[in-house]
Amino acid sequence: MKFIDEAKIEVIAGDGGNGVASFCREKFRPFGGPDGGDGGKGGSILAIADRNINTLVDFRFAKLHKARDGENGRGADCYGKGADDIVLRMPVGTLIIDQNDGEIVADLTEHGQEVLLAKGGEGGWGNIHFKTSTNRAPRQKTEGKPGERRELRLELKVLADVGLLGMPNAGKSTFITAVSNARPKIADYPFTTLHPNLGVVRVSHEKSFVIADIPGLIEGAAEGAGLGIQFLRHLQRTRLLLHIVDLAPFDNIDPVKEAKAIVKELKKYDESLFEKPRWLVLNKLDMVPDAERTKRVKDFLKRFGWKGPVFEISALTREGCDDLVTEIYHYLEQQRRLEIRAEDTPQMAEDARGIASIEPDDPRFKAIE
């Protein structure tokens, strides 16, 4: 299946049916009165997040989604039938944006999350609603309201805990293959990764996290060079970035220059993405002689000016990979606990204020004691 992470669609909700002005015409009922029914409601357009879908390919060619109109009312107190709603199933992580004003309509981050994209028009009233003691033969009726119409842009941002950064052939695909269930294409030439790959990393039977690999970045990516800039949005939801560096490149390429180019392009693309926690992973150490390994690592760190966490691995032989995976999981668990604590703090403060406001003679005071 082709990976599609962008699409533009138009959604048109159905119009409401018109109410009708009608009068009862039955034998032995000369003054039957008004019996015009209401029009039916137009169909709405809904979006629902589905974790079983991982691409927007269904919306690349099916650009128009239009719901049916509601039926008109009829005589004999018959109401028009409402139209069925249309449900569009989208991948979890889809961002829905209004094309006209750039407003974010919805961000589908959870499986089963449902959002209204275009509301169907309400049905009009029949003359049965306008009958009064002084107006026994009303001829008023109302028309159905038109349904909403929207032009939307869909952007898919994959949901992952960890994202991989690096130049082409830095070993990102080999790394994600070594530590997860993902099986991307691996070859000895650049740009073998053409779309994001997701893998589940199992630390133990009940402990896991999700890692995302995107096509490699090159210098000038922020201006459109290469493929990676098209997929950097997929790293915006991650909690941690792994900057993978090839410490044994071919053709005498300076790894420090390449690493600095990645950092530069990241900052030019999105300042918030640049500010995300980032760890340095020095890869392909199996290709460096043991006697030179320590010297080469120290030289790289000195010239790169890196002061954050550093890990030395070989994705091919899995040397150092298990330790890195364990450290990643511990870091993610710590971040989750901090987020839960931050969410609970306002409620705890509110509870504390409520307790402080109780008077000593209040029965609730004794309950607290």
Image: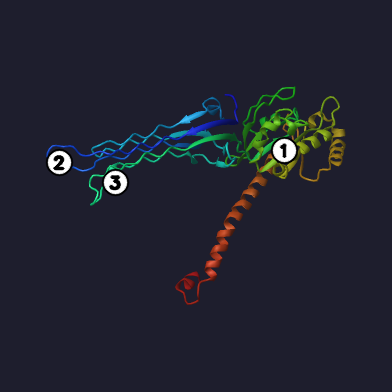
Asked if residue 222 lies left or right of residue 94, the reply is right
Residue appearing at x 49%, y 72% in the figure:
365
Q: Which residue is mark 2?
A: 30
In the rendered image, the residue lying farthest to the left is 28
Evaluate whether residue 53 shows in this view: no
Q: Which residue is mark 1?
A: 269
Q: Nearer the viewer, residue 351 or 236?
A: 236
Count neighbours of disc 1 (C-alpha within 10 A) and say few if under 14, some if 14 to 19, many if 20 or more: some
**Residue 304: x, y in percent?**
84, 40
Q: What kind of residue is marked 1? A: Tyr
Residue appearing at x 68%, y 42% in the figure:
240
Q: Are marks 1 and 3 in contact (CB under 8 Å)?
A: no
Q: Which mark is residue 97?
A: none
- What separation in Å lies between label 1 and label 3 (alpha carbons)? 59 Å
Q: Secondary structure at mark 3?
A: helix
Name the N-terminal-most of marks 1 and 3.
3
Asked if residue 108 lies left or right of residue 298, the reply is left
**Residue 308: x, y in percent?**
78, 45
Q: What kind of residue is marked 2? A: Pro
Q: Which residue is mark 3?
A: 129
Name the N-terminal-most of marks 2 and 1.
2
